[in-house]
């Protein structure tokens, strides 16, 4: 089993990211927790060594300064949990280009920059890169198309990174949870939903998705699965989480695209 003693977690102040940080701290690990918001340390699990670093990963200078702080304390990382992200909702025709760029900037482009800066530290340990993807990477969600597109990008990124970095002992993995009950739901940007005649359909679709999310799996449970995957000696580049969602992903492989799109339209269209 691969051993984790030092880990970097982005988006570590809430949701899955905080769940990962808490479990690792409980196991006695040294955790570098990156997030825009710094919490009271009493809000984290006791046991390991916590380094909270205030960082907006979309800001290059902020990211440089964060990694300078990390390098002052360690010359190696066992795992990078690239978890920071957010979602926007709305019809493709209504969504301003600025919003699309914002979505890709945090979920994809900034994740790439974090990975680039972490690679030298991961090489020392022959470490792991875990990207928080989503079932939405495979199942195209109407009115969340750009969120789905960013997660699909992370799946491809993980697979290509895994090939490129394997000679250096680094493995890259995209993990696809389904519905998770976190404040991600409350932070989704839905301002463009009611702009045009898509409005009512958009609002209904997002409301259904958000109901599913609020009834989803607890983030600490998902966090435990991320860590178990990170500890595998021979991990695959893609993992779905949960029996139901694994079945959904399998159906998307086996059934005709036209049929699956019809099913998605019935549920969320």
Image (tube, rainbow, N blue to C red):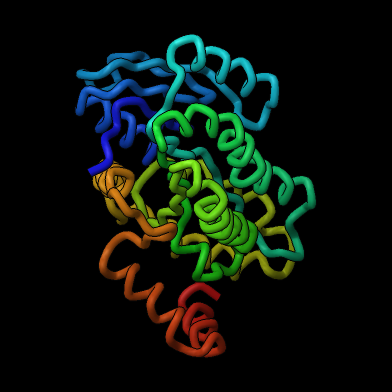
In the image, residue 83 sits, relative to residue 58, either above or below, namely below
Horizontal placement of 230 versus 209: left or right?
left
193 or 160, which lies in front? Answer: 160
Residue at point 32%, 36% (across, down): 20
Report x, y in % for residue 155: 52, 58
Quadrant where the N terminus sits is top left
127 or 49, which lies in front? Answer: 127
Query: How many callouts does the rendering have?
Result: 0
Residue at point 27%, 41% (across, down): 2
Tell me which corner region of the image, top left, top right, bottom left or bottom right, holds residue 40: top left
Residue at point 55%, 50% (across, down): 161
Quadrant where the C terminus sits is bottom right
Horizontal placement of 114 versus 45: left or right?
right
Report x, y in % for residue 86: 55, 44
In the image, residue 232 sits, relative to residue 64, either above or below, namely below
In the image, residue 185 sits, relative to residue 247, either above or below, namely above
In the image, residue 108 sits, relative to residue 43, either above or below, namely below
Report x, y in % for residue 199: 65, 64
Report x, y in % for residue 77: 42, 28
Is residue 185 shown to the viewer in this render? no
């Amino acid at each position: 089993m691969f051993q984790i003693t030092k880990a970097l977690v982005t988006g570590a102040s809430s949701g899955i990211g905080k769940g990962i940080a808490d479990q690792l701290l409980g196991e006695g690990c040294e955790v570098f927790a990156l997030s825009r918001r710094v919490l009271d340390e009493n809000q984290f699990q006791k046991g390991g060594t916590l380094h909270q670093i205030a960082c907006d990963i979309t800001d290059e200078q902020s990211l440089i300064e964060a990694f300078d702080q990390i390098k002052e304390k360690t010359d190696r990382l066992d795992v990078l949990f690239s978890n920071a992200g957010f979602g926007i909702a709305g019809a493709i025709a209504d969504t301003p280009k600025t919003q699309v760029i914002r979505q890709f900037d945090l979920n994809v482009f900034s994740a790439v920059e974090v990975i680039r800066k972490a690679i030298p530290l991961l090489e020392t340990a022959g470490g792991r890169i875990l990207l928080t993807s989503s079932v939405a990477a495979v199942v195209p969600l109407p009115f969340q198309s750009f969120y789905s597109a960013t997660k699909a990008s992370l799946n491809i990124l993980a697979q290509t990174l895994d090939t490129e970095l394997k000679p250096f002992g680094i493995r890259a993995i995209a993990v696809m949870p389904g519905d998770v009950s976190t404040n991600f739901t409350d932070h989704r940007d839905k301002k463009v939903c009611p702009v045009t005649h898509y409005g009512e359909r958009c609002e209904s679709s997002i409301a259904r998705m958000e109901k599913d999310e609020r009834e989803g799996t607890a983030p600490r449970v998902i966090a435990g699965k991320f860590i178990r995957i990170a500890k595998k000696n021979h991990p695959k580049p893609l993992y779905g989480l949960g029996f139901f969602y694994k079945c959904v992903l399998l159906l998307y492989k086996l059934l005709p695209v036209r049929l699956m799109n019809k099913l998605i339209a019935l549920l969320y269209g």
